[in-house]
Amino acid sequence: MQVLSHIQADFADGRDSQYLPSMTVKVQSRLKANELRMTYLLADAGNSNGYNCELLELRNITGRRGAAGYLLLACINRAGNG
């Protein structure tokens, strides 16, 4: 199953990693409203920093770092499963 839950375009006025927290919170909230749970998040290496790793850990999301060029992907489960 694929779920398109959030689309966001930003200006190139900052680092990619600064947008990950707000996108994660928006996607996770939208999924939760539909009884879905985000369990993994894949982002390119530019999103990996201490703040973002801590945010994912606090939200019970396992972060995965891919090679540059990966899109942000989230693995979701039905709430209460897996």
Image (cartoon, grey):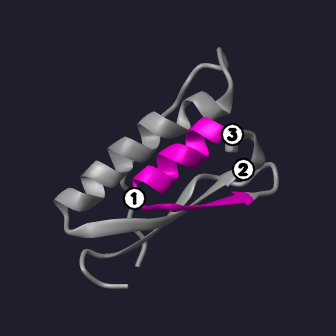
From the top left corner, tell me how far across and down residue 61 is, in percent.
47, 61
Q: Nearer the viewer, mark 2 or mark 3?
A: 3
- What x and y, as percent, mark residue 13? 65, 14
One can see residue 7 in this view: no
Where residue 62 sits in the image (x, y, percent)? 54, 64
Disc 3/disc 1 C-alpha distance (Å): 25 Å
Q: Magenta span has 62?
A: yes
Q: Residue under label 1, please give it.
A: 4
What residue span does the magenta drawing correspond to? 50-65
10 Å crowding of disc 3: few (<14), some (14-19), many (20+): few
Give the CA distance from mark 1 to mark 2. 19 Å
Taking the magenta stretch, the answer to whether it contains residue 23 is no
Label 2 belongs to which residue? Answer: 44
Q: Residue at x 44, y 40 (%)?
A: 23
For the residues labelled 3 and 1, say whether their Cβ atoms are less than 8 Å apart: no
Foreground residue, 63 or 12?
63
Estimate how packed mark 1 is, as few (under 14), some (14 to 19) or many (20 or more) residues with alpha carbons within 10 Å: few
Q: Amino acid at mark 2?
A: Asp
